[in-house]
Image (cartoon, rainbow, N blue to C red):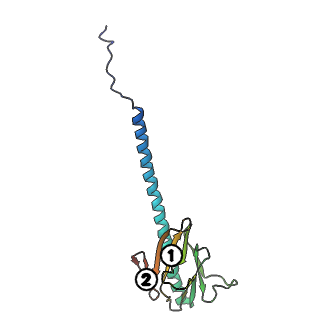
């Protein structure tokens, strides 16, 4: 009977405390990489949306000027939106804006003053849909970090974003 009571060697092995800690550390590292990647995509999406909104306002202003006469694109005081007014009405409280476009939450737009001119808060679009060449600086409200500078050519409306040319 002793042949049947013999112990077999154990093939299952429990993980030691060091191995458990190493596995937890690797999982935490992987979760951190995934979270950082997800946050980076949010900034890129925010940048793309802000650039698109800026280009849309410029295009709409040029079309409205050709159809309705000269217009003004005005930047709100906080830079969170761009407003379209008939020329000469941008300061009148009684008249309503022709249109307005909000930027993504946490993004502000200002006119780029790298040309060294006087600071402005508006762009004049003539009845032919032309402007002076100008740039719009897009930045984050939280830390002031620059997202992009969108430069527009006044005669054609072609735009360039940080070296990327688009029509």
Question: Which residue occupies the extreme top position in the image?
Answer: 1
**Image check: 155 left or right of 144?**
left
Question: Which residue occupies the extreme left position in the image?
Answer: 3
Q: Residue at x 61, y 77 (%)?
A: 76
The 10 Å Cα crowd at callout 2, few under 14, some 14 to 19, many 20 or more, is: some
Total label count? 2
- x and y, in percent, of residue 2 in the image: 31, 8
Comes first in the chain, label 1 or label 2: 1
Comparing 33 with 63, the one in front is: 33
Comparing 119 with 28, the one in front is: 119
- x and y, in percent, of residue 15 in the image: 39, 32
Q: Are marks 1 and 2 in contact (CB under 8 Å)?
A: no
Comparing 160 with 110, the one in front is: 110
- Between marks 1 and 2, how big is the CA–CA gap? 16 Å
Q: Is residue 68 above or below residue 36?
A: below
Image quadrant where one finds the C terminus:
bottom left
Q: Residue at x 41, y 40 (%)?
A: 23
**Image check: 5 left or right of 85?**
left
Residue denoted by label 1: 137
Q: Residue at x 65, y 85 (%)?
A: 91
Residue denoted by label 2: 158
| Secondary-structure class at tag 1 | strand
Q: Which mark is residue 1?
A: none
- x and y, in percent, of residue 165 in the image: 39, 78
């Amino acid at each position: 009977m002793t042949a049947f009571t013999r112990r077999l060697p154990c093939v299952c092995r429990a993980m030691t405390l060091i191995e458990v800690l190493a596995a937890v550390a690797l999982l935490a590292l992987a979760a951190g990489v995934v979270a950082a990647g997800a946050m980076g995509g949010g900034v890129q999406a925010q940048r793309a949306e802000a650039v698109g909104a800026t280009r849309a306002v410029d295009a709409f202003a040029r079309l409205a000027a050709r159809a309705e006469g000269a217009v003004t694109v005005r930047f709100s005081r906080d830079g969170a939106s761009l407003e379209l007014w008939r020329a000469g009405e941008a300061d009148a409280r009684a008249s309503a804006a022709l249109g307005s476009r909000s930027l993504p939450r946490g993004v502000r737009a200002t006119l780029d003053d790298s040309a060294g001119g006087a600071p402005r808060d508006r762009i004049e679009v003539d009845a032919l849909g032309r402007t002076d060449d100008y740039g719009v600086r897009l930045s984050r409200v939280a830390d002031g970090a620059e997202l992009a500078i969108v430069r527009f050519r006044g005669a054609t409306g072609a735009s360039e974003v940080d070296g990327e040319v688009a029509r």
